[in-house]
Image (tube, grey):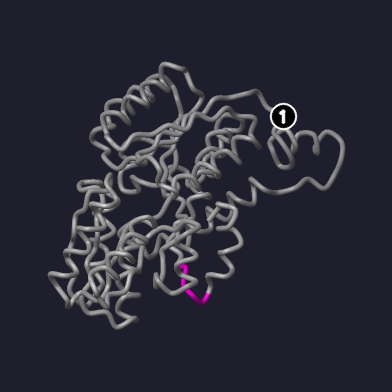
Amino acid sequence: MKKNRMPAVVTLAVAGLLVMTGCSSGGGKQAQADNALGAAGKADTPRIKIAMIHHAPPGDTFWDIIRKGAEAAAAKDNAELIFAGNIQAPEQANLVQNAIDQKVDGIALTMPNPDALGPVVAKAKAAGIPMVGFNAGVDQWQRMGLLSFFGQDEKVAGQAFGNRLNEAGAKHASCVIQEQGQAQLEARCAGVKATFKGTVDVLYVNGQDMPSAQSTIQAKLQQDKSIDYVVTLGAPFALAAVKSVKDAGSAAKVATFDTNKELVTAIKNGSVEFAVDQQPFLQGYLAVDTLWLYKTNGDFPGGGQAPVLTGPAFVTKDNVDAVAEFASRGTR
């Protein structure tokens, strides 16, 4: 079913971008109306307040890219942006409650632990606050009653990753999960297992302690010399894994989900083989812009029936130069 759905969803994403970035070519009242809806320049609409509540740990540069996308949309849409997060699900729920108490005009929410967020999401809906999902929760946003979702299907991304490992001739991969129990991370490794023809081990590390994570990966590589690929689920962990491989005296290669500026450089110099790019800037931008569109014109991409997929796309040594220009300014 997912394979049949993806082309339609991509079409939705493209159509949404055309609406959001189109320019008016005429003058008069129609041009003024187009400008008021943000077709060009800054929106001439009433000031609104949007909360973006996420599960990011402190210092994760991937989330800096999401924030830049959200801030770009907020600047265009005459919106005040509240960007707040906590990796602990109860604290993330508290942040949603704070947004409800502030009577925000819309909430964009990640859902790595949807059951823990269910009660507070119900409160937001009861308060009449429109909500969209992004990044985490592709399998749960409809059940939770959100308008739209922007991100990638993590299991599909994992399956594509597994196929690429097959193409590379890999035999034994260690899939490193930095936060046990987060649905989107578990789905990635499950997807890799589904299509990879070799052996996949799941290795849990402490994502809040990078030196500990690095030493855990190193110990695994020293223990099992048959591992020829380390699969990480975030750019900082890929860069740590490169050091782990070196310190362990291992011949394993490193590939990852997600990017940042340093990761793109690592692909260029060959220390990381490839990365899945889920286009975090686009996730942040579309989440905020959709809430503004809903408030000003009742629009929301996907019609509540399908997510808007922003990935997966692969960044490899063959195409990294095209990405590097944007990565250098922190938007890829």
| x and y percentages locating residue 3 in the rendered image | 37, 65
Image position, residue 245 (x, y; %) = 28, 69
Nearest to the observer: residue 115 or residue 98: 98
Residue toward you, 70 or 7: 70
Q: What residue type is labelled 1?
A: Asp
- Label 1 secondary element: loop
Q: Based on the displayed image, in which of its 4 quarters is residue 175 positioned?
A: bottom left
Q: In this view, does 49 lie above or below 85?
A: above
Question: Residue at horizontal 27%, vertical 46%?
Answer: 209
| Residue 109 belongs to magenta span | no
Question: Foreground residue, 35 or 67?
Answer: 67
Q: Is residue 316 magenta?
A: yes
User: Who's the residue at 39% across and 57% down the image?
Assistant: 235
Q: In which quarter of the image is the N terminus?
A: bottom left
Relative to 300, residue 8 above or below: below
Vertical side of 152 occupied by 112: above or below: above
Front one among 243 and 56? 243
Q: Residues within 10 Å of mark 1 (few under 14, many from 20)?
A: some
Task: Tell me if 302 is positioned left or right of 184 in this view.
Answer: right
Magenta stretch bounds: 314-318
- Along the horizontal axis of the image, is 57 left or right of 7? left
The residue to which callout 1 is attached is 44
Horizontal side of 218 relative to 26 (left or right) equals left
Q: Residue lying furthest right in this view?
A: 27
Q: Locate residue 253, reporting x and y percent.
A: 31, 74
Main secondary structure found in the magenta portion = strand
